[in-house]
Amino acid sequence: MSGIDAVKKIVETEGQARRIVDEASSNAQQTVSEARVQAERIRQEATATAQQRREEILQQAKEKAEAEARQSDQETDQVLSNYRKLSEERKPTALSKAVELILNA
């Protein structure tokens, strides 16, 4: 092989190497771009899942709080009813005592 042929071969090889590097760079950029898109999609899915879970937790907490409030209302109503009954039962005695105190005064 002559010197000119060797130089041509070197230039040809360098051209092929440049094309290979350009292709690799292009492939790497495409891979990075696809990875970014996939990462964004995964982030959005994770955010949506977290939001849905948050809403479920809030709904459960609301339902539990409402149930506890209803139970507390029932207990309060029962206590008030008991006090009313007790008051009604003691009313005649209280009235008697009041009349007795007034008459004895």
Image (cartoon, grey):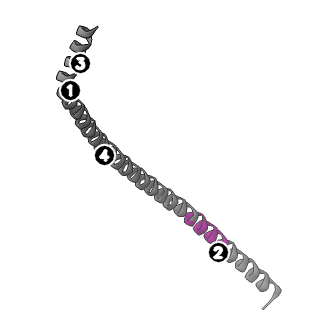
- Residue at far bottom of view: 1
**Which label's residue is closer to the chain start, 2 or 4?**
2
Task: From the viewer's side, name the closer residue of 62 and 55.
Answer: 62
**Which label's residue is closer to the chain start, 4 or 3?**
4
The circle on residue 90 is 1
**Neighbourhood count class around disc 4 (C-alpha, 10 Å): few under 14, some 14–19, many 20 upward:** few
Residue found 67% across the figure and 77% down from its top: 16
> Which amino acid is tagged 3?
Lys
Task: From the viewer's side, name the closer residue of 93 and 29.
Answer: 93
> Which amino acid is tagged 4?
Glu
Residue 15 on image: x %, y %: 69, 74
What number of labels is visible?
Answer: 4
Task: Verify CB contact (< 8 Å) between mark 3 and mark 2.
Answer: no
**Which label's residue is closer to the chain start, 1 or 4?**
4
Task: Verify CB contact (< 8 Å) between mark 1 and mark 4.
Answer: no
Image quarter in which the N terminus is found: bottom right
The circle on residue 44 is none
Cα separation, mark 1 vs mark 4, equals 41 Å
Start-end of magenta stretch: 19-31
